[in-house]
Amino acid sequence: MRTIRGGVVPPVVTPLTEDRRFDVASFENVIERMLAAGVDGIFVLGSTGEVAFATDELRSQVVSEARRIVGDRAPLLAGVIDTQTDRVLDQVRRAQDAGADAVVATAPFYAVTHTPQVTRHFEILGAQSEVPVFAYDIPVCVHTKLDADMLVALGRSGAIAGVKDSSNDDIGFRRLALKNADAGEPLVLFTGHEFVVDGAYLSGAHGAVSGLANVDPEGYVRLHRAHLGGDVATVRAEQDRLARLMEICLAPRETTGWGSGVGAFKTALMLLGVIASNQLPQPFEGLAAADVDAVKAILAEVGPTS
Amino acid sequence: MRTIRGGVVPPVVTPLTEDRRFDVASFENVIERMLAAGVDGIFVLGSTGEVAFATDELRSQVVSEARRIVGDRAPLLAGVIDTQTDRVLDQVRRAQDAGADAVVATAPFYAVTHTPQVTRHFEILGAQSEVPVFAYDIPVCVHTKLDADMLVALGRSGAIAGVKDSSNDDIGFRRLALKNADAGEPLVLFTGHEFVVDGAYLSGAHGAVSGLANVDPEGYVRLHRAHLGGDVATVRAEQDRLARLMEICLAPRETTGWGSGVGAFKTALMLLGVIASNQLPQPFEGLAAADVDAVKAILAEVGPTS
Amino acid sequence: MRTIRGGVVPPVVTPLTEDRRFDVASFENVIERMLAAGVDGIFVLGSTGEVAFATDELRSQVVSEARRIVGDRAPLLAGVIDTQTDRVLDQVRRAQDAGADAVVATAPFYAVTHTPQVTRHFEILGAQSEVPVFAYDIPVCVHTKLDADMLVALGRSGAIAGVKDSSNDDIGFRRLALKNADAGEPLVLFTGHEFVVDGAYLSGAHGAVSGLANVDPEGYVRLHRAHLGGDVATVRAEQDRLARLMEICLAPRETTGWGSGVGAFKTALMLLGVIASNQLPQPFEGLAAADVDAVKAILAEVGPTS
Amino acid sequence: MRTIRGGVVPPVVTPLTEDRRFDVASFENVIERMLAAGVDGIFVLGSTGEVAFATDELRSQVVSEARRIVGDRAPLLAGVIDTQTDRVLDQVRRAQDAGADAVVATAPFYAVTHTPQVTRHFEILGAQSEVPVFAYDIPVCVHTKLDADMLVALGRSGAIAGVKDSSNDDIGFRRLALKNADAGEPLVLFTGHEFVVDGAYLSGAHGAVSGLANVDPEGYVRLHRAHLGGDVATVRAEQDRLARLMEICLAPRETTGWGSGVGAFKTALMLLGVIASNQLPQPFEGLAAADVDAVKAILAEVGPTS
């Protein structure tokens, strides 16, 4: 029950109260709604989960609460995002202690590294982590693209168990999937897409870690099951609807950057009655009224009915 | 017969002799092989077709010879690549005079422009061109990404007939396809992909302008027809094979940048006996022996049998 | 009189009438005002000179008219900007025929090249040009930074006579100047700066090709002569004033990209009575009224008095 | 004695033993040598000081030891580098507790922010820090360039005391210095340059935070004093020598990215007998033998004599 083989694994938002305290009740609502929809795992402290904003203390609390809520019902993955190897190792220990079944780590960032250092980074993480390590490929945040050959080699050596690909590089993903297939599939491959999950499945993804699954977990589960069942018409129709829904992240005008996407997810969840507030962590502010209205309009048109 | 509605439209290479003269006989072989494979159009003077290297005189000759070879058997598109509007208009006239059925133009480049200027650029081209204009979205060359809303508006006003998307931005392409659908499909959408044409079809592409179709036109025609017939298994198997074949462009070690891709296409065509030489235009050199061997090995494994 | 050894060599704007014809009378006024100010050369068809917008026919006309106006009073440099080697060679012939004393060429662009190809490009240009070739380092337009070791080697071999550095990379410029000094100064080094010409002189520049010298040629001549005379206080005071004046290029709100800078130069020249119109080439429009006012205010405060 | 008004403030390396423990004795040697050279402050936990690699525990130790060593002899600045506001606030408290006189903070990173968020970030830091805050402009690490108008406004409001500019944007620095002058100099401006400190002084820098001052503190002090004394010939000669010495950071071939620069500094210090080992933190390795030789050769030619 706690092994990660693919499927829909949403990167859970971290709800805040208006005065920016962790809103555990809302967090529980989000996760229970996902589990009811049939997701295959829960991923906390991803980029969507505000990992870059959370203090170490809050990070531990988020993982602990998630573990308590999820119990044995699904595997729990936790982001261990930090700048360089030794700091990430501290995060790994923190996540393990709080109950994570697996950790998700990026390439080093802030100080520039290249493939030899990135390789060594993941080798060290793999050797020292007690739980499986997933490599998180997210150049928009860390400004390094993970090399496909490196990833497959790390998979073969056992250093990493899989990849979450948020690189928006569909060529890179196809090449990774083919190389992984040729190597006997050592890696579980997740796409971080919201807009083109169907294309990623066609390329060989085993699952999807889509931020929009906070808002519409049933949609992504339906898409995944249709894909498994070979029902291409449903796959495409569901993906087209979800792509239209994802426009909520591009609608905000006052808040830009990271805040427009997660701000839209939180706003939609607030409008759906799942969480209490759309507050964002410092230095962001929750979406302004006009932007809330923009999200509301899209949600009314193509959003989930439950 | 000369209307462009989608399908496989390869961007034809421009074969050169060893001493860098235009090799018309080889050019004819490449095009005849494509037509025999059942392609839906011929695109000359694309990035693959060495447009950036060709003098105005050579450009006219390439279009004229292509027109002579193709006759009425297929529509002929020609790249009219130049830096800014007035220079592109000169290229449009040249391409029309030489017999092109449509022209393919990028955003302005060298001097930085933004969406208001790019819009005006295509409006002027649309107003002054006597043949349909396709917008060529290729940020790796022009360092501007075409805005989806702008493209659909240009389609609705009749300024452009379609888009060739070589932006490697699958989110952008999905959004463009949805917006185009919502507007009543004013645009014919081509993907410039080689690796993920199947995903682009799923997103709503009407056709593919794949450089690798120089080497394996039958493969891309097979993929396109399987897509039209709803045969997903064939689509994916053919795409996986073509993706493996596309590794020829990543294999060269001595030649990098533009030359590794087109150098590999020309080398494969030479090895297949279609063209006489793999020579590249100045300041590039044709692939070195070790790189030719690398191409040969991949071609032997996953290349076309005819 | 027509040898280029450094000093102030302004990149002359190309004035247009309201209906976008070449305004030769205004062009003559601009150049005569520069010569009266004591500039050391005239550079036409640079980025400021609208080279990317000018048809081949207009390019020839601009060089011819400049030659006629300048006569033997100063060396005349002409930009030969085009995508790749063979096209640049065509531009070199055109510039030579029209009377240029030297040509200014960038790295190849549109199709990606690296240092081996860039080297060969300049070697070919150097071998085939009948007049001296200056390398134009302008990554914002061509997206390639010229390598310092390559440039010095090209200088030693005689392929190029000098460099115009518009890369805004002061580390790169210092390194180039030191390497050039170590090699016996084969290259004449111009900075393309407006804001930090004093720093470039300190690093070893022999001259400045500053677009703002269209507006204030006397200021840049004064700065250069103070530098030659070791009068640091005047150098810095003049540079600070010119830096404040250069804010005209950052003031426009409606026009962005290339058009804000050259639009501001043309607007200032119009306000000073030197040229008739601030019109810009397609797809740009001349600065709007509010932006003209912004330029006017800065000009009144820190602009030239003559 | 502990107020920061400018001058030479080296970003101190963090020496490690071969088995990667903090080498306090070597650290003390580095700092004592700097103080003996007459530096105006000590900056620990900058990018050069391995802040991105150091665990929270090590960070506290580095600041504590630096405070103990420096005593009241100079102001002590400490980097408080972390991803977003709340995490940086934790680092601020840690640095204050360990004895820092001022903290140095970057724009938020990992999650994308724009100027409104960056402004709020520094406002919060300024309000909650008990010691002065310096803004650290280092786009190569954080991928955000700090806006000059924002910085001056933050200076006027008292949120920040100064700026360390490592943006390698000499236009931006000149504009910042002019705006700061116009506002009555609310900010102390440091350049992070090694190669063009003289140019930055000319533009208005009050001091230099040069990594190379680890290797040659006397050189940078000499340069600074010559600048204050108006001795341009010495300024330029010293800067040219230091620029040649800085080539040690570009010489390594096996180690690239962050490690080539700091690896070269540590190697030079080891060769000069100041520190015991040139070890680098995980995932880097200390420079290999051939790279050590390259550093040695440059050091012998243009390095410090003491």
Image: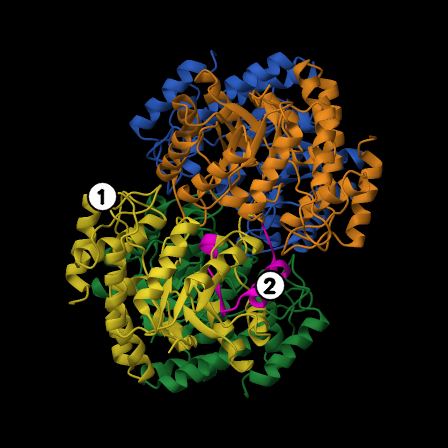
Chain colours: A orange, B blue, C green, D yellow
Position of residue D287 measured from the top left corner of the image (x, y, whole percent): 25, 46
Would you say A113 lies left or right of B226 here?
left
Would you say A50 lies left or right of D265 here?
right
Q: Amino acid at mark 1?
A: Ala
Q: Residue at x 47, y 58 (%)?
A: D94
Q: Amino acid at mark 2?
A: Ile
Say which residue label 2 marks.
D124
Position of residue D83 measured from the top left corner of the image (x, y, whole percent): 52, 51
Front-most of residues C150 and C106: C150
Would you say A222 lies left or right of A96 here?
right
Q: Are marks 1 and 2 on the same chain?
A: yes
Position of residue C235 measured from the top left corner of the image (x, y, whole percent): 40, 82
Front-most of residues B18 and A77: A77
Mark 1 or 2: in front is 2
Seen in the picture, residue B260 relative to D114 is either above or below; the reply is: above
Q: Which residues are magenta?
A: D112-141
